Amino acid sequence: MEGSTSPKALRVAAISGSLRRGSANTGLIRAAKEICEESIPGMVIDHVDISDLPLLNTDMEVDGGFPPAVEAFRASVRAADCFLFASPEYNYSISGPLKNALDWGSRPPNCWADRAAAIVSASGGSGGSRSMYHIRQVGVFLDIHFINKPEVFIKAHQPPKKFDSDGNLIDPEIKEELKEMLLSLQAFALRLQGKPANSKHAA
């Protein structure tokens, strides 16, 4: 609102590691956006679509520039205050689309560095835990600072039903877990920026 002295909202670049329609992980980003709009003042979720990114090929880098889709993606990453990754587990590891996005963002100059991040995963029997720890390993090199807790692993295919047929989150307990994770991300991101946290939650 014009004339307001409230602090600038934290912009969260939210990236889904799944490209399919009806993805539960993309649904988690939609749920996170709704939670922030309804009950977390000062935090805004921006879904960054990675479906148009080409496979990493440094031959596409010409005179220090990148293909248009990559330039747009890197601009979105640079503009963010922190990150939210929502990704399935593929073969015990990171999904191909997410790894490709992480790699494009890492090309010099690295767009990810010195910001907070959180990871949530909806996947099979492990709930995506193995993939989540691999994302954390990649983040070490990229200088991404992940919150440690809470960890949100969602066993998407086990009862009770957690998502509808369009991938929308319908489980109220998981919505509350997601909210707690977002509050922790908010507090940690503000701490890294040297600002007072808006809640009691921390990483």
Image (cartoon, helix red, strand yellow):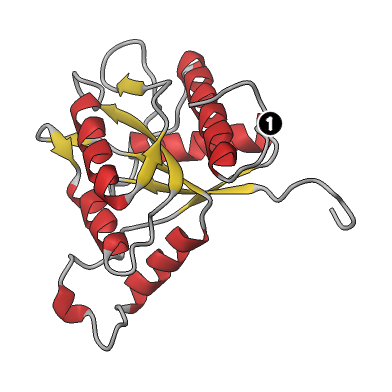
Amino acid bearing label 1: Asn
| Residue 138 quadrant | top left
169 in relation to 114, above or below = above
> Is disc 1 placed on a helix, strand or loop?
loop
69 in relation to 89, above or below = below
178 in relation to 189, above or below = above
Q: Give the image location of residue 167, x and y in percent.
A: 38, 34
Q: Residues within 10 Å of mark 1 (few under 14, many from 20)?
A: few
In the rendered image, which residue does mark 1 sit on? 198
Residue that lies at the very extreme toward the left in this rendered image: 91
Q: Give the image location of residue 125, x and y in percent.
A: 18, 18
Kindly identify the residue that appears in the image at 31 percent across and 28 percent down.
122
Kindly identify the residue that appears in the image at 32 percent across and 30 percent down.
121
Kindly identify the residue that appears in the image at 20 percent across and 20 percent down.
126
Q: Is residue 148 left or right of residue 79?
A: left
Q: Give the image location of residue 33, x and y in percent.
A: 55, 40
Q: Which of 59 and 148 lies nearest the eye of the viewer? A: 148
Q: Is residue 43 left or right of residue 137?
A: right
Q: Which of 6 and 26 lies nearest the eye of the viewer? A: 6
Q: Give the image location of residue 10, x and y in percent.
A: 61, 47
Residue that lies at the very extreme toward the bottom in this rendered image: 63
Kindly identify the residue that appears in the image at 28 percent across and 61 percent down.
106
Q: Is residue 121 left or right of residue 89?
A: right
| Residue 101 quadrant | bottom left
